[in-house]
Amino acid sequence: MKRAAISLFLALFIVSACGPLPRPFGRDDGDSGTKLARQIFFEGVEVQPMTGTTKPMSELIADAVIGRLQNTYEIPASYQGMDRSEFVLLGHVVDNQADPGVSEPISVEWQLLRRDGEVLERFVDAVDASRLEWDYGSAPMLEKIGERISTRVAKAVLGERFGTTGQDRLLGRAGVYIGQVTGAPGDGNVSLRRAMAVALGGGGVRLTNNPVEAIFTLSGTVEMGSPENNAQSIRIVWDVKDVDGQVVGTARQSNVVAAGSLDGSWGRTAAFVAAAATEGIIKVVRQNDPNKLRAPNLGAPRPPRDIPQTAPPRTPILKQQPGRAPPPPT
């Protein structure tokens, strides 16, 4: 495999649509802010263990509701252990077998409260299932419960944002879709795209293989200069676009390489290029993430399965003379 003689790309500039946020509020010298900090909650839902049923059933129903809240409405939710969330969901199971006037054998009394105790929603959900389905935790039954309850909770939590145009554009969307890379000689277009997926995934960025499900789309453009004195300039531009197709940030890389050195296989060169651009691209994504103000960091998700699960190579520290690019890695 031909190894391309290319040095690391040093010039990396980020242009983002977001500037520094104003800070109109100061803090008195004698105020530590501790009391205020304890009163700040994020827009999430803690599902408490249900009463009137077994622990396994309580966990199954909680999982069904939590999954819908997170995946459909992008509302952070957890079964207990989320005491910084603004909302708390309580449920009590009622056995209706002794009541001949009720057709459903099981119903659940739900309460959605704010952390301070204010009741936002109080309602009863009749479980459309037989007693046998309830006792065995039927999957279709749990799916229906999760859908009904999560929708009711999401409407209360999101308020006017539920079902609005802006919310619909983001419903079900998450992560970054890596689009096409164009203009590169040799196998550069394919190699750069794959290397960028590995680098971003290793950096904790959530990736998706479906552009319809993504909040951001990353695309790359490569421009090669004409060979001159056995040298050739190269410029790579990475654009980060939002769901409306607007560019919210750009990373630029440029250098001079040996003429024709990239006409074949890029090899490890693509990995070094992607690693050098990753930090700037992650900054743009985080600065413009529409969910960051209400979704806590629940841990870095893994890249899609069809992308190699290897860490990006470390950028070697090379000596450099003033005004000149460093030599290619050996």
Image (cartoon, helix red, strand yellow):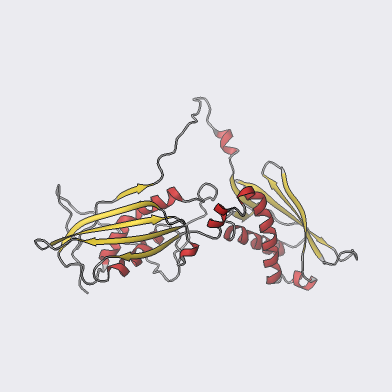
Residue 29, image x, y percentages? 49, 25
Residue 9, image x, y percentages? 24, 56
Q: Quadrant of residue 130?
A: bottom right
Residue 103, image x, y percentages? 85, 67
In the displayed structure, 11 sits above or below 181; it is above
Left or right placement of residue 298 versus residue 239 in this view: right
Give 16 or 206, whichever is nearer the viewer: 16
Left or right placement of residue 227 versus residue 292 in this view: left
Q: Quadrant of residue 106?
A: bottom right
Residue 236 seen? yes
Q: Quadrant of the N terminus?
A: bottom left
Q: Quadrant of residue 152?
A: bottom right
Residue 177, image x, y percentages? 43, 62
In the displayed structure, 152 sits above or below 142; it is above
In the displayed structure, 28 sits above or below 270; it is above
Residue 311 seen? no
- Residue at the spot x=27%, y=68% of the render? 188
Looking at this view, name the residue that lies furthest to the right. 100
- Residue at the spot x=67%, y=67% of the render? 143
- Residue at the spot x=52%, y=25% of the render? 30
Left or right placement of residue 233 versus residue 176 in this view: left
Give 281 or 78, whichever is nearer the viewer: 281
Looking at this view, name the residue that lies furthest to the left. 229
Give 257 or 48, whichever is nearer the viewer: 257
Left or right placement of residue 58 versus residue 24 in this view: right
Give 27 or 217, whichever is nearer the viewer: 217
Q: Quadrant of the C terminus?
A: bottom left
